[in-house]
Amino acid sequence: MHILFTRPEIDSVYSAKKFIQLGHQVSVFPILNIVKKKTIDINFTNYNSVVFTSSNAALCLDQNIQSNVRCFCVGEATAVQAKQKGFNNIITAGGNYLQLKETILNIADKNDGKFLYIRGEDIAHNLEEDLKASGYRIDSVINYTTSLNPDFDQKTLTILKDQSIDLIFIYSNRSAAHLSKLIFNNDLESKCSSVQLRSLSENVFFPLKKIKWKNVKMFSAGNEQFSLD
């Protein structure tokens, strides 16, 4: 099967490696590009725990940390980036937001100290609000934003036109809306009848409903391999 991943490059490359090991052909076209935001240096001694809901937040951290502060990561790709930044005490969730939140609630005492949530500007879930609602103290730092890729690169355009893509994974409503725009701008909607779509949720899928896909299924982040059947 030829699979197209559409997340920012660092996430897509990590997922691609897993699927290549399973014997699939993989291509990557990041619909969103990551843009670092300038932030002040963080004093991690002020915090009991740090949370990353994306590998890009860890990647865009401009400090090299040598700290045993507890670090919660949404999944393995994020944990790899956090470790490279110098975090030593890493707790890794199963790959999606709900699993991360459940891990924090099960492990962390709300009276232990303050959390620091390092994140992107656009988020699907607001961890800060969710943890505050459960009685935790938490600060947020935004260290990256995203920009839309203006068009398909030539390689991606060619494989879509040739109908050599079997399946596409889409992860956010913003990405889905832009993917839909690029498909119509390039007159590719008829080509999608042979493509399976895997969407993170019904809400994410909504901007792509005008396109007639071969089939559409929802999947759970971190468990993409179980959505191929």
Image: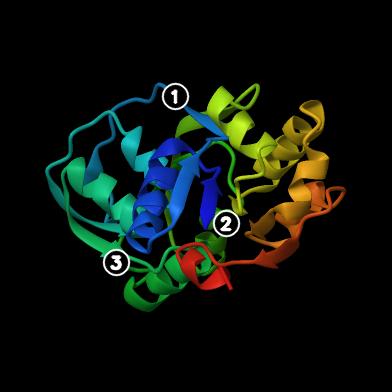
Residue neighbourhood size for the residue with mark 2, other residues' Cα within 10 Å, grouped as few (<14), some (14–19), many (≥20): few
Numbered circle sitting on residue 37: 1
Please state which amino acid type lies under the numbered disc 1.
Lys
Residue 170 visible somewhere in the drawing: no
In front of the other: label 2 or label 1? 1
Q: Circle 2 — which element? A: helix
Residue to which mark 2 is pinned: 129
Above or below: residue 33 compared with residue 9: above
Q: Residue at x 45, y 51 (%)?
A: 25
**On the rendered image, what quadrant is the C terminus found in?**
bottom right
Which residue is at 59% across, 55% downward? 125
Name the N-terminal-most of marks 2 and 1.
Answer: 1
Pick the front one: 159 or 3: 159
Return the x and y of residue 54 as percentages of the image width and height.
43, 48
Badge 3 amino acid: Asp
- Residue type for callout 2: Glu
Tally the marks: 3
Residue under pointer 3:
112
Q: Residue furthest right?
A: 210
Q: Of the two numbered discs 3 and 1 on the same chain, state the one appearing first in sequence.
A: 1
Q: Is residue 194 left or right of residue 225?
A: right
Q: Dot 1, crowdedness within 10 Å: few (<14), some or many (≥20)?
A: some
